[in-house]
Image (cartoon, coloured by chain):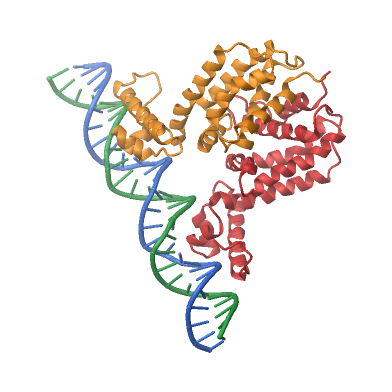
Chain colours: A orange, B red, C green, D blue
Amino acid sequence: MPKTGMVKVQTRTLKTRAKLIEAAQVVVDEAGYEALRVEQVVASAGVAKGTFFAHFKDKDALMEQLIGPKVDSYLDAIETLPAPKDVEGLVQALMPLVGFMTSERYVFDVILRHSGAAAKETIGPIAQNFQRTGMVLGPWLAMGPFRKDISPELLADGVGAFLIQAMALHYCALHNEMLMQDQLRIYLNAWLMPQA
Amino acid sequence: MPKTGMVKVQTRTLKTRAKLIEAAQVVVDEAGYEALRVEQVVASAGVAKGTFFAHFKDKDALMEQLIGPKVDSYLDAIETLPAPKDVEGLVQALMPLVGFMTSERYVFDVILRHSGAAAKETIGPIAQNFQRTGMVLGPWLAMGPFRKDISPELLADGVGAFLIQAMALHYCALHNEMLMQDQLRIYLNAWLMPQA
DNA sequence: TTCAATAATTGACCGTGGTCATTTTTTAGG
DNA sequence: CCTAAAAAATGACCACGGTCAATTATTGAA
C-alpha cells in the first residue's frame, strides 16, 4: 500500500489510483455497483490485481470511494435548500438521497456496513457522510418547528436511525418508493414533532 | 434442493439437514460464527459440498438457521420478565439480546442484512424475530409510563430503530468510547418519554 | 552519475463460496 | 420383486476476492 506517512507521494501512485477509480466508475456507470468486479477494473485500468490491493484495502474500500462522494453530492444539494418548515419538507428534501441509497440492494448493504457499523481505526468516507448528515441536519432541525427538549444532534441522530429503518423495511423496491416515503413521514412526525 | 411441495419428505433429507446444522453449531460453539467454513461443516457432517447447497440456498441461509433461534431464545427470556416500569428497566431487559447481537461483528452484519427482509417473498427467521420483537415490545410499552400519543407498534418500531443505531455506533471508532447501554438509554429516553 | 534504500508493481497462487452434470438412492406402480 | 421416474447426493469445477515473494521503478545522498 502506498505509504501515507510524511514522505513524498509519488506521482505514479496518484496516477494509478486515479486510473483505478476512473475504470471502476465506468464499470459502475455501465452495469451498476453490484456488477463491479475487481478483475474487470484492473484489466481496464491496465494494472495487475496486486496493485489494486496495494491501493485499496479491499473491494469495499473502493466502493466507499465511489459511493461516498456520490452521497456527498446529494448532501451538497440538500445543503443549498432552505431549512424545511415541516416534516413533509424534510422528507422531500431527503428523498433524492434516500433514492440513491436504495437504488441497489448492494449499495444499501455497503452503506449499512460502513455507516458506523464499520470497526475501523480510520473513519471512512461513508461514516464521514453520516457525520456530515448530522451536521447538515442538526442546524436545520434547530431552526424548524420541531421539538426543542432535546439537542439538535440527538434529533439528527434519530432522523438517521429512522432513515435506516425506513430503508431497511423497503430497501428493495423502486415501486415501493411511495411506501418508503409514507413510512418515513410517520416516523419523523413521531420523532420530530412536539407532542400535542 | 429437497422439494418443499406436498410430497413426502424423505427421512434421509431430515437426517442430512440435521447433521449439517449440528456440525455447524459445533463449529460455532468452538470458534464463533465468523470462523464457520462451509467446507468444514460438510466435512464433519460427512456429506459433499453440493449437498450443503441443496439444503441451504447459501451460507447466509445456514446462518439464519443458527442465529434466528438464538435470538428467539433471548426473546423468550424477555417475554417472561414483568413489563418494565421505566426506560432503565427496558434497557436492562434488552441488554442480553443486544449483547448477543454485537458479540461478533459478523453476527451483527448478518442480522442487519436480514432484518429488513420482511418485504421479501420468503420471510426468513431473522426477519421473523424482528417482527416478534415488535410483538413482545408493543404490549410492554403500552403498559409502561411511556408516551401515549402514538401507537405501541410505532413505539416498538422506534425502539428497534434505535437499537440498531446504538449497536451500529458501538462499532464506530468515533463513538465506541461511550457505552452502548448509555447510548441506548439516551435514545430511548428521548423516544419513549412524554415530553416535559 | 552512481547506488543503496525505499516504494510501487507484478502475477502466480490460494481460500472459499457456489454450480451443475452425473451418479446413487428412494419411491410407487404393476 | 422389478423397474422407471423422482429426489437426493456427489465432487470436479468455476468465480472472484485477496496474498505475497519476487521484480521493477523512484528517490535522495554522496
- The quarter of the image holding the N terminus of chain A is top left
Return the x and y of residue A155 as percentages of the image width and height.
Answer: 69, 20
Asked if residue B145 lies left or right of residue A77, the reply is right
Return the x and y of residue B45 as percentages of the image width and height.
Answer: 55, 63
Q: Residue at x 58, y 51 (%)?
A: B61
Return the x and y of residue C7 as percentages of the image width and height.
Answer: 33, 26
Which of the 4 image quadrants contains residue B189?
Answer: top right
Q: Is residue B174 above or below residue A44?
A: above
Return the x and y of residue A183 as percentages of the image width and height.
Answer: 68, 31
Q: Residue at x 64, y 41 (%)?
A: B115
- The quarter of the image holding the C terminus of chain A is top right
Q: Residue at x 53, y 52 (%)?
A: B58
Q: How many marks?
A: 0
Evaluate whether residue B178 shows in this view.
yes
Which of the 4 image quadrants contains residue B41?
Answer: bottom right
Evaluate whether residue A1 shows in this view.
no
Which of the 4 image quadrants contains residue A134?
Answer: top right
Q: Nearer the viewer, residue B150 or A66?
A: B150
